[in-house]
Image (tube, helix red, strand yellow):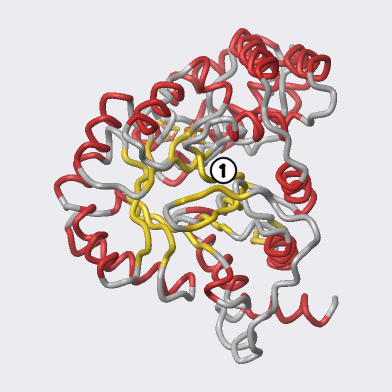
Amino acid sequence: MKRRDFIINSALAIGGTALLAGCGKKEVKKAEKQVVRRKFHNLEIPLIALGCMRLPMRDGKIDMVELDKMVEYAMAHGANYFDTAYMYVEGKSENAIGEILKQYPRESFFLADKCPAYLVESPADVRRLFEEQLKKCQVAYFDNYMVHNINKNTINNYRDNDMYGEILKLKEEGKVKHLGFSFHGDPKMLREVIKEHKWDFCQLQINYLDWEVINAKELYEIADEAKVPVIVMEPLRGGGLCNLPEKAAAKLKEACPQDTQASFGLRWVSSKDRVFTILSGMSNLQQLKENIDTFTDFREFTESEQKTAAEVAKIIQSQGAINCTACKYCMEVCPRGINIPAIFGLYNVYKSNGNGFMFGVNYNALKEEERADKCINCRLCSKNCPQGLDIPDLLKKVDATVKEVGDKK
Ligand code: SF4
Ligand code: SF4
């Protein structure tokens, strides 16, 4: 192991304390090619940003060596916006990105974090959680700070505890530069939330599949009309849009041979002018490099490509896949430890390729206690699902399908 790799791993192993501290700050060596940027208030923000929900993993832990390389590469190419949250990677994302970013001068990167609305039971909770997050990230302020995940289950926490007012106080103290919210509710709720306060930005789930088949178009248009700048999350729908069903992949390849599935999906999002950055959860250096290439050698999305996106979305929809983005929020509350995203992921692959044998084989590779038939129908998971999925019902459907294909052991 190289000395630098050793230092990074050791620093995390001892709780992220002293080993990196005192070494001086790392100079950002600028690469020749820089990612395109967009205006956000008085700033220029990279159009592609590193979402820290799906960080690189090794042996069940965050791979700090890989993450260090990814951040270095991103910084060199001007992709210096990082987005984390309290519960990402089972609560370890903030520590990890903070440990890596502390090597760099604070003014050389943008860091976004979010207040978990579902944990806020009093106004005082906002400041308590915020101070904890500053410590975990080892910073004195956040560039962007959000009410996290406003939806039908959290709207009362957000309103009753005046989360906006509490974060506004932090902004007035200089600890938050811009105040926003991330959102997983319906258009009516978005209209209300946007009108309630003066927001610096909002964070919405927008991609070409949700645009055609759910309500992303309506959500975007509400923010656009209100002139609220937009950050996009799940531009590739949790990786689903870079693992397309065969028919959809063939259609895309034929129409846009110069694109990968990921570059097509990301470029599609960039065609929305109100969007100032796109968060993509990248799990290794290779994915990061590919995404950065898309934004250093940037090509505007064309009208004919818009038609292709709509056609590809229709093909995906016709496959009957489950709209899970693999965010794992459901797993945080499941008392039985059912591996919900893995189960839905396997089902979606089956719906895409029709290979019942492999579906059965892969399903049986899951631990018995994590399978769909161990669900006790308590419904806690559905309350936490940003996609509004009826998870217990869908688990029953998957279980029935596994039995149907005849390979359940
Ligand atoms: S309904 Fe089933 S999957 Fe959902 S939380 Fe309860 S046991 Fe877990
Ligand atoms: S079922 Fe819902 S909460 Fe669970 S991983 Fe999928 S999208 Fe996330």
Q: Is residue 86 visible?
A: no
What residue is shown with label 1? Answer: 278
Residue at 73% across / 15% down in the picture? 248
User: Which quadrant of the rendered structure holds the N terminus?
Assistant: bottom right
Q: Residue 384's quadrant in the figure?
A: top left
Measured as percent of width and height from the top left, residue 76 is found at 73, 64
Measured as percent of width and height from the top left, residue 250 is found at 81, 15
Q: Residue 319's quadrant in the figure?
A: top right
Measured as percent of width and height from the top left, residue 309 is found at 65, 18
Tell me if residue 394 comes above or below residue 130 in the rendering: above
**Mark 1 secondary-structure assignment:** strand
Tell me if residue 14 comes above or below residue 336 in the rendering: below
Residue at 64% across / 18% down in the picture? 306
Dot 1 alpha-carbon crowd within 10 angstroms: few under 14, some 14 to 19, many 20 or more: many
Q: Which residue lies furthest to the left in this view?
A: 160
Measured as percent of width and height from the top left, residue 70 is found at 72, 60
Q: Residue 351's quadrant in the figure?
A: top right
Q: Which amino acid does label 1 sit on?
A: Ile
Q: In the picture provided, is 403 more to the left or to the right than 214?
A: right
User: Which quadrant of the rendered structure holds the C terminus?
Assistant: top right
Quadrant containing ligand 1 reads: top left
In depth, the one of 405 and 67 nearer the eye is 67
Residue at 58% across / 88% down in the picture? 18
Ligand 2 within 8 Å, label 1 CB: no
